[in-house]
């Protein structure tokens, strides 16, 4: 399930209600999919959530957690946030105002942890392309577009690094 939640450009807290609505929508669809396909369905929700793994939109509304326990217990429709450990280690996929943010997330369902869905998580999530896609000197992502009235960097990519995860059939 691809996600691109509302940005923080109007201010992190001023725009938070819009990301909370997006999180509630994601949780609604996760619940409906589980009702139709069962508790062991393979679900991956990923994208630019424009919030950190520990933001309340993620934890309280999207029901994304850094702990495997609530996901494996299956009583609620929790998703495991694979990017939370990287954020906890101070890494990020986005660089703004001199600091790293983990705004891009990969969330998975219980069926991908247990393998009961026919697919299983193989290893940890990673931030991809840091060597190839970083601006020289800063380590931040090298943007293609620099905004209105500025030159385009034809060697640029995005203002976010991509993330990856490996799933295998079981």
Image (cartoon, rainbow, N blue to C red):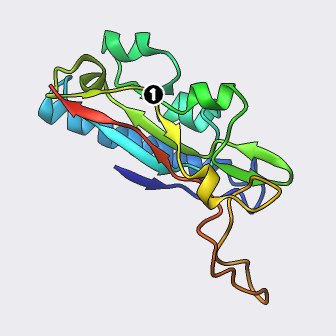
Q: Residue farthest to the right?
A: 98
Q: Is residue 75 visible?
A: no
- Residue 68, above or below 64: above
For mark 1, does the 10 Å Cα neighbourhood hold few (<14), some (14 to 19), or many (20 or more) residues? few
Q: Residue at x 42, y 10 (%)?
A: 69
Q: Position of residue 107 (x, y in %)?
A: 42, 35
Q: Is residue 26 visible?
A: yes
Q: Nearer the viewer, residue 141 or 4?
A: 141
Q: Position of residue 163 (x, y in %)?
A: 50, 46
Q: Residue at x 31, y 43 (%)?
A: 29
Q: Secondary structure at mark 1?
A: loop
Q: Is residue 1 left or right of residue 82?
A: left
Q: Residue at x 36, y 32 (%)?
A: 108
Q: Is residue 27 left or right of residue 105?
A: left
Q: Is residue 88 left or right of residue 11?
A: left
Q: Nearer the viewer, residue 16 or 87?
A: 87
The residue labelled by disc 1 is 124
- Residue 61, above or below 8: above
Q: Position of residue 92 (x, y in %)?
A: 67, 42
Which of the 4 image quadrants contains residue 119?
Answer: top left
Q: Residue at x 62, y 32 (%)?
A: 56
- Residue 158, above or below 53: below
From the image, which quarter does the C terminus lie in? top left
């Amino acid at each position: 399930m691809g996600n691109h939640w509302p940005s923080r450009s109007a201010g992190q807290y001023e725009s938070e209600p819009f990301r909370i609505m997006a999180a509630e929508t994601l949780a609604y669809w996760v619940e409906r999919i589980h009702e139709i396909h069962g508790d062991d369905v393979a679900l991956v929700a990923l994208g630019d959530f424009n919030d950190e793994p520990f933001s309340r939109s993620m934890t309280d509304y999207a029901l994304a957690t850094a702990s495997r326990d609530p996901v494996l217990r299956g009583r609620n429709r929790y998703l495991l946030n694979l990017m939370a450990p990287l954020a906890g280690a101070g890494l990020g996929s986005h660089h703004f105002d001199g600091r790293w943010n983990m705004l891009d997330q990969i969330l998975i369902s219980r069926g991908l942890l247990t393998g009961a869905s026919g697919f299983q998580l193989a290893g940890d999530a990673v931030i991809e392309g840091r060597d190839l896609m970083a601006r020289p000197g800063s380590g931040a992502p090298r943007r293609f577009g620099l905004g209105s009235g500025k030159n385009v960097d034809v060697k640029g990519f995005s203002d976010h690094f991509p993330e990856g995860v490996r799933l295998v059939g079981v």
